[in-house]
Amino acid sequence: MAIARPLSERVEQIVRATPVHDIHTHLYDPAFGSLLLWGIDDLLVYHYLVSEGFRQFDIPYDSFWSASRTQQADWIWKALFNDHSPLSEACRGILTVLQSLGLEPRHSNLTQLRSWFAAQKPADYIDRILQLANVASVCMTNSPFDDEERPLWDRGFSRDPRFRAALRIDPLLVDWPRTSARLRTWGYDVSSDRSPRTAAEVRRFLADWTRRLNAGYCMVSLPPDFSYPADTDTAWLMREAVLPHGRELGQAFALMLGVKRAVNPALRLAGDGVGRSNLDALQNLCAANPDNRFLVTVLSRESQHETVVLARKFRNLHPFGCWWFTNTPQLIEEITTLRLELLGTSFTPQHSDARVLDQLLYKWDHSRSVLSRCLTRKYTDLAASGWLVRDEEIQRDVTELLGGGFDRFVRS
Ligand code: RAT
Ligand code: ZN
């Protein structure tokens, strides 16, 4: 008689074998060349590690930033791997990456690791990482306001279908005075008057870029005190331009809520913080705009429960990911369990937020472990109530959670 495999093994095997559609990253189509980061030095100077490095070394900020990338990586390696145990999630991530690639950091120094990465051919390496991480596609973060990437979109290039686009519009919504001036130089007839003409021109800008990128959704990150409705440029632009644009083009709008930008500017990209979001704004948006679809991720742990309850009330709201400071195993476990218990499978548990290609290896390895544990516990609870889950049902649920449900939501 065949011995039944333990539920935990069945779940883990399915979660690991199911390709994921990674719905938010900062990776670039290979056509962007050096904007697509990879290799040991880029891994080590990841801003999550930079902020941890500064807790251990006393190098002045200016000296750190004026040093070469290799020197910065050396400092971080010494502080976080040699002088202390690499216990943090971002440090452990480096080890998982090296291990997945068959490299042994205990038996090699940084120079040896560097030569290994230098010997990789980019195109093959990209294939290898996506395959090893079992990632079917990644969604980029594409900003028309980024001077490095805009020229390539303007020129056009042959797209790698594994790299999907998302239209990122933070400067439009959080820095309207400066952004309106830029829009004018690009031929959009906008002014600071909050007039119908200005709104129509902003919609034209959004439509142009949506088509240029073939953007799957539009996205913004906002501070904890974002309010809606409100007598602010942000709220006005949303009501008169972003939301009508979403309805016209059938495009979902992703809100990433709760980031306090530049809490410590000396840390640059690593200097952003977190605050509890005013989620009345999200409720008002969902209630007032039933024909818009909203994706949401919130940065503070304290905002997670309220967000999930809102998603129960509004079917035009789809929670996604454990963002940034919540992308740690314990919080992923807590947030994913909370979501499963209140939403079933109608959410997307994770995105990687990878900025360096190789990070896909650790972000998905670690998240898949946690997701497997959460699902196993819930299926075990069902079994205790007499519902024995079948493999094809586990597969259906996992496919939904690893991008299938998200795809349906953004396309509906
Ligand atoms: O997680 C990160 O890398 C952050 O710096 C942010 O990029 C954040 O994910 C964002 O998209 O604003
Ligand atoms: Zn991000």
Image (cartoon, rainbow, N blue to C red):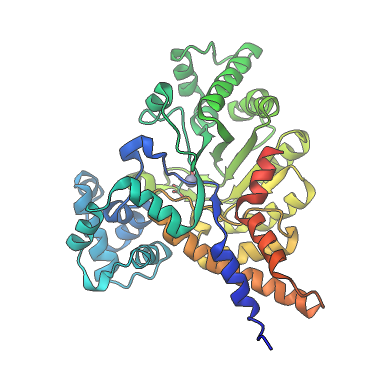
Above or below residue 101? Residue 176 is: above
| Camera-side residue of 232 and 25 | 25
Residue in the foreground of this view, choosing between 154 and 126: 126
Q: Please state the horizontal and vertical placement of residue 154, each as a whole percent of the image.
A: 42, 22
Q: In x, y percent, where is residue 387? A: 80, 74
Q: Residue furthest bottom?
A: 1
Picture coordinates of residue 198, whole percent (x, y) = 59, 14
Judge left or right: residue 57 versus residue 305. Answer: left
Q: Quadrant of residue 104?
A: bottom left
**What residue is at 66 percent from the left and 55 percent from the top?**
400
Quadrant where the image shows the C terminus: top right
Quadrant of the rendered image containing residue 399: bottom right
Quarter of the image with the N terminus is: bottom right
Of the pair 226 and 211, the residue shown nearer to us? 211
Q: Is residue 319 visible?
A: no
At x 68%, y 47%, the residue is 318
How many marks can you see?
A: 0
Q: Furthest residue to the front?
A: 1
Residue in the image at 40% along x and 63% along y: 93
204 up-or-down from 30: above or below: above
Q: Is 274 on the left-hand or right-hand side of 394?
A: left
Q: Is residue 169 visible?
A: yes
Asked if residue 161 is positioned above or below residue 238 in the image, the reply reads below
Q: Nearer the viewer, residue 332 or 107?
A: 107
Extreme-right residue of the structure:
386
Identify the residue at horizontal 32%, vertical 37% (top origin). 33
Query: On the picture, is 58 further left or further right than 10?
Result: left
Give the quadrant of residue 250: top right
